[in-house]
Image: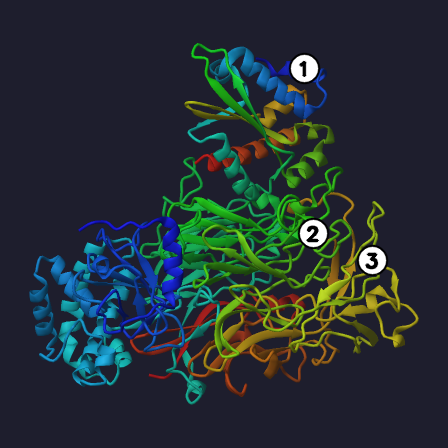
């Protein structure tokens, strides 16, 4: 067997051109074929000429298309000279048996070199037998005997298509599905083992787990039912459940007809106690039958960690605690970890001291190969310096090397992508890719460019004086996890406010890439496109939640769309490949007069135009008056600039009825500093085509106070001003409230809303049961008493179908997850901390538990 | 070599930055690389990487400590009078972090003379040597005695050392 090499430059077009195209002969007669468990869309298929089961440099590869077909643009003789390997990738590959969301676990299948153009679990079993030394024909005969297939069955046939003419292929499909389940289990639990070991393990599992229940499997009513018999699981292995951050699950056992029956199955008590400033924004992950819970520690103690529990029972398996390096007081008030990522049998924990830890998912032990340098004891890397004001709030995102194109520093590596928080401390934001196995930094994208870089001219180039190099304090933090567009090889993320936050007197210009959506190449970290939602931000109108990626049919064409809900109240939608807006946001003149001047005499120069979208806003955007504590508040239109304290603002920004001038303290702007849409996770259902956006309604009073000396990031907020917000007990809930918005991205319109009694800081998840889940807070006639519920809504109509009372009326900020074990669907959420309590005692209590709900047995 | 002579040497220089470069290059040219490494009070780390590789990695990693590369990198080729008459290449990279400036300034503004932090990289056939000052010792040699200042300088030294170790991993 010889190794096939093709010039590097030619391998890229092959990968791109073949993934979705080429003339495919589905009979498999030549250099094309089919990948199936059910048909697998977007699986990586390659000629494994060195028989190691991995895609190596020089090996020919392609992606299966939307019907599971693949095509190699080389001679048939070349194709037949090497085994074909198909890698189904978690978060990317879609099994058309369950087409509504990508697989949650990866697995590998193989087909022998000479005969098969079909790559399936059955060909993998044949290949395993050949590897044991059996001739191919003997291996085929043995398999058919073991499985009880009659003579009409060809194990190298497309059994899904075969069912159309031969009903015997129905049981073949069932068996194949259970074999795939075993392959998933092997790849998930032993990702580092060799292909030989995996195949040996596969043979053992077939003998022990499949053969004894073969009759039941073959007689199952569907492949899905057969998979459940084989112990099939559907997990939630990343913060958002998939690379697109859609927080949608194809699970549908819990649906609109039975969701009202949900009951608590178990809960895990962390024992961390009630804490006001330690909000729980994280959700647990589930891999196979294990749930991994981020332990975000306690407010006054520098410990964080991970807890592994049985996802069916809540029984603790292991617990790992790590000690943080010094975490400055300044960081405490924004302790808001999204927790952990998973990949390659490792849990990646981000901690407040800006380190990422690698923990063995089986044992809970640190992976000491993961480190900064030879002086480090290992187990962690330092992504940034806490003394500089950096910290971490996002969950790391693991991307396997099979999804990274071969043209950059990250090529050939499993990577984690992580961005840094700390923009409010006047740091310079960045997002980075690290080798997931050894911790090496591979690329870094600075969200605030230096003067010589693209976008550097959107910042003043100051080279002298105490405030020189403003870009080095320019903010642009990456608070939340990016999305990954595997099809186009893009990491897509939102950025935070510019620094200083509210004082723009020393940062004249648009201030790229603050308050933006940015797409960078996953292999190189180089910018591909960006869109700045707010130029020269003065309102903290940054991107609070993770952008989502989903598919839409636009003018008859399938498009990969990026959706990002802004604090501004607009839902920004882009073509993922190009960054082109789906709905226009033309530059529009906005109020620009302000009397803010810094101590060097430099006035604030607000940006003259802002992108004002033509699509429907999902919250009110000001230009109205309300009554607040007996006063009339002037709710100015969006983008009205802040004033300095103790001054008056007049008609430049206001409707005529505001004349004469009013105190700055009475000039409030809408949306609020919390949006619009802030940090709570959105979700998107491919079934309804709707995106579900948690949103806030209410104004904020912004005040700019320029710095007089260089900000020390260890001393706290460096925002160059302050804001006040919040509803008093005498205010009506209509003026300060929240809502769950179902938004149609195709038309740019709101389909339905569900009002909440308070600001809405609760995340969502949605399912193929046509459900959207979201916790909410409900007021009572006693203004000091609020109740909290875990609610479920009909995803199509918005009808509330469930209000499950959360014990102790704990408010919930985190998004929910759902998973399935042995055919039973569970819903889980973390109830603790509570950002809502910032507003005082009228909204919810704190908590520290993980709740898991399910249908009655 | 006694760093206490350093301030006197500075008096004849047009600027601090240029002076340090001249000083280091002078020492290298006069004594040769082996002698520098043997006697210099400055810290040094050896590596197989080239100047270009090191400078690219410094750019890559600088954000970890919010370091800005101050000014431009300068590369010079020198023929060194050693036994083997080898060519060496030297480069100077200057780095500054706003939070380090902020902290030092709050304790003693005169101590800002140590910024930007300079790295001298000398590349020869056998690899490169990265040299840099220990700020705490540098300040002490200049007569600064404030304990808080020296403690803060020590903290910066520790982080800068770790930064370079990571760059050169």
A370 above or below A823? above
Location of mark 2 (residue): A458
Q: Where is residue A95 in the image (x, y as percent from the top left)?
A: 33, 73
Q: How crowded is mark 2: few (under 14 residues within 10 Å), some or many (20 or more)?
A: many
Please give the label number shown on residue A644: 3
A133 above or below A685? above
Please give the label number shown on residue B9: 1
Q: Where is residue A775 in the image (x, y as percent from the top left)?
A: 53, 76
Answer whether residue A110 is visible to the viewer in this image: yes
Look at the numbered disc 3 and give the secondary structure of its residue. loop
Q: Where is residue A532 in the image (x, y as percent from the top left)?
A: 64, 61
- Asked if the residue at tag 1 contacts the one at tag 2, i.e. Cβ–Cβ closer than 8 Å, the answer is no
Q: Where is residue A821 in the image (x, y as percent from the top left)?
A: 32, 73
Answer whether residue A831 is visible to the viewer in this image: no
Closest to the observer: A94 or A558?
A: A558
Look at the numbered disc 2 and give the secondary structure of its residue. helix
| Horizontal side of residue A791 vs A255, given as left or right | right
Nearest to N terminus: mark 2 or mark 3: 2
Q: How far apart are marks 2 and 1 (CA)?
A: 41 Å
Closest to the observer: A89 or A326?
A: A89
Do callouts 3 and 1 point to residues on the same chain? Answer: no
């Amino acid at each position: 067997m010889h190794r096939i090499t093709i010039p590097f430059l030619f391998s890229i077009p092959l990968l791109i051109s073949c993934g979705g195209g080429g003339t495919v002969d589905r009979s498999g007669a030549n250099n094309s074929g089919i990948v199936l468990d059910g048909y697998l869309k977007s699986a990586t298929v390659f000629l494994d000429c060195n028989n190691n089961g991995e895609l190596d440099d020089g090996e020919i590869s392609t992606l299966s298309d939307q019907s599971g077909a693949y095509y190699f643009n080389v001679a048939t003789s070349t194709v037949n000279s090497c085994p074909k390997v198909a890698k189904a990738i978690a978060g990317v590959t879609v099994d058309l048996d369950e087409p509504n969301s990508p697989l949650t676990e990866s697995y590998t299948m193989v087909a022998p070199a000479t005969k098969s153009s079909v790559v399936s679990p059955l060909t993998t079993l044949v290949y395993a037998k050949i590897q044991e030394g059996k001739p191919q024909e003997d291996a085929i005969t043995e398999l058919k005997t073991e499985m009880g297939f009659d003579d009409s069955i060809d194990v190298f046939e497309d059994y899904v298509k075969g069912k159309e003419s031969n009903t015997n292929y129905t049981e073949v499909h069932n068996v194949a599905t259970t074999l795939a389940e075993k392959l998933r289990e092997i790849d998930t639990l032993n990702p580092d083992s060799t292909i030989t070991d995996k195949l040996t393990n596969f043979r053992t599992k077939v003998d022990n787990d499949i053969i004894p229940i073969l009759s039941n499997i073959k007689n199952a009513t569907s492949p899905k039912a057969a998979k459940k018999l084989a112990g099939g699981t559907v997990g939630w292995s990343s913060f958002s459940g998939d690379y697109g951050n859609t927080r949608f699950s194809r699970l549908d056992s819990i649906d609109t007809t039975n969701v009202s029956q949900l009951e608590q199955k178990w809960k895990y008590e962390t024992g961390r106690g009630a804490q006001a400033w330690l909000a729980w924004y994280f959700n647990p992950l589930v891999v196979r039958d294990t749930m991994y819970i981020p332990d975000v520690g306690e407010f006054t103690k520098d410990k964080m960690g991970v807890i592994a529990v049985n996802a069916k029972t809540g029984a603790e398996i292991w617990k790992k605690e790590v000690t943080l390096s010094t975490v400055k007081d300044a960081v405490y008030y924004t302790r808001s970890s999204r927790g952990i990522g998973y990949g390659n049998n490792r849990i990646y924990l981000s901690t407040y001291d800006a380190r990422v830890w690698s923990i063995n998912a089986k044992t809970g032990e640190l992976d000491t190969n993961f480190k900064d340098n030879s002086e480090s004891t290992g187990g962690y890397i330092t992504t940034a310096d806490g003394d500089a004001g950096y910290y971490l709030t996002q969950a790391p995102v693991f991307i396997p090397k099979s999804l990274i194109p071969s043209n950059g520093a990250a090529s050939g590596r499993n990577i984690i992508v992580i961005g840094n928080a700390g923009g409010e401390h006047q740091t310079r934001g960045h997002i980075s890719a690290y080798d997931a196995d050894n911790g090496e930094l591979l690329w870094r994208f600075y969200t605030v460019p230096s003067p010589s870089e693209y976008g550097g001219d959107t910042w003043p180039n100051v080279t002298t004086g105490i405030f020189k190099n403003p870009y080095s304090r320019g903010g642009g933090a990456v608070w939340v996890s990016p999305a990954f567009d595997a099809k186009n090889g893009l990491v897509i993320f939102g950025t935070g406010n510019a620094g200083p936050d509210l004082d723009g007197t020393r940062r004249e210009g648009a201030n790229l890439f603050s308050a933006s959506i940015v797409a960078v190449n996953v292999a190189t970290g180089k910018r591909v496109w960006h869109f700045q939602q707010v130029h020269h931000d003065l309102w903290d109108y940054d991107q609070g939640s993770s952008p989502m990626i989903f598919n839409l049919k636009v003018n008859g064409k399938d498009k990969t769309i990026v959706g990002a809900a802004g604090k501004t109240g607009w839902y920004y939608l882009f073509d993922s490949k190009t960054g082109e807006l789906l709905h226009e946001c033309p530059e529009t003149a906005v109020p620009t007069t302000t009397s803010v001047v810094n101590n060097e005499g430099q006035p604030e120069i607000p940006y003259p135009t802002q992108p004002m979208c033509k699509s429907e806003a999902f919250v009110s955007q000001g230009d109205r008056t309300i009554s607040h504590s007996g006063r009339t508040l002037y709710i100015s239109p969006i983008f009205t600039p802040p004033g300095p304290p103790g001054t008056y603002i007049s008609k430049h920004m206001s409707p005529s009825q505001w004349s004469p001038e009013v105190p700055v303290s009475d000039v409030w702007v809408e949306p609020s500093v919390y949006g619009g849409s802030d940090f709570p996770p959105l979700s998107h259902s491919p079934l309804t085509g709707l995106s579900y956006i948690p949103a806030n309604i209410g104004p904020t009073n912004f005040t700019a106070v320029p710095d007089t000396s260089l900000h020390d990031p260890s001393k706290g907020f460096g925002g160059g001003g302050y804001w006040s917000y919040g509803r008093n007990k005498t205010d009506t809930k209509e003026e300060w409230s929240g809502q769950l918005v179902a938004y149609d991205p195709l038309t740019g319109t709101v389909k339905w809303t569900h009002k909440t009694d308070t600001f809405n800081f609760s995340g969502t998840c949605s399912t193929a049961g046509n459900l959207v889940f979201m916790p909410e807070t409900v007021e009572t006639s006693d203004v000091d008493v609020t109740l909290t519920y875990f609610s479920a809504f009909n995803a199509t109509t918005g009808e509330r179908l469930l209000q499950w009372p959360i014990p102790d009326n704990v408010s919930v900020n985190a998004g929910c997850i759902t998973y399935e074990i042995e055919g039973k669907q569970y819903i889980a959420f973390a109830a603790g901390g509570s950002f809502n309590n910032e507003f005082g005692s009228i909204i919810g209590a704190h908590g520290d538990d993980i709740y898991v709900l399910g249908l009655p047995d | 070599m006694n760093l206490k002579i350093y301030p006197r040497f500075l008096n004849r220089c047009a600027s601090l930055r240029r002076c340090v470069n001249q000083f280091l290059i002078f020492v290298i040219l006069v004594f040769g690389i082996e002698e520098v490494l043997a006697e210099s009070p400055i810290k040094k780390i050896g590596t197989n990487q080239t100047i270009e590789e090191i400078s690219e990695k410094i750019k890559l990693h600088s954000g970890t400590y919010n370091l800005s590369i101050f000014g431009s990198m300068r590369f010079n080729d020198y023929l060194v009078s050693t036994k083997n008459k080898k060519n060496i290449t030297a480069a100077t990279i200057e780095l500054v972090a706003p939070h380090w400036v902020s902290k030092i300034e709050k304790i003693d503004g005169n101590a800002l003379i140590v910024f930007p932090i300079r790295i001298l990289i000398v590349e020869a056939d056998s690899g490169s040597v990265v040299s840099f000052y220990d700020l705490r010792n540098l300040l002490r040699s200049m007569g600064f005695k404030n304990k808080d200042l020296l403690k803060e300088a020590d903290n910066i030294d520790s982080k800068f050392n770790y930064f370079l170790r990571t760059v050169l991993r």
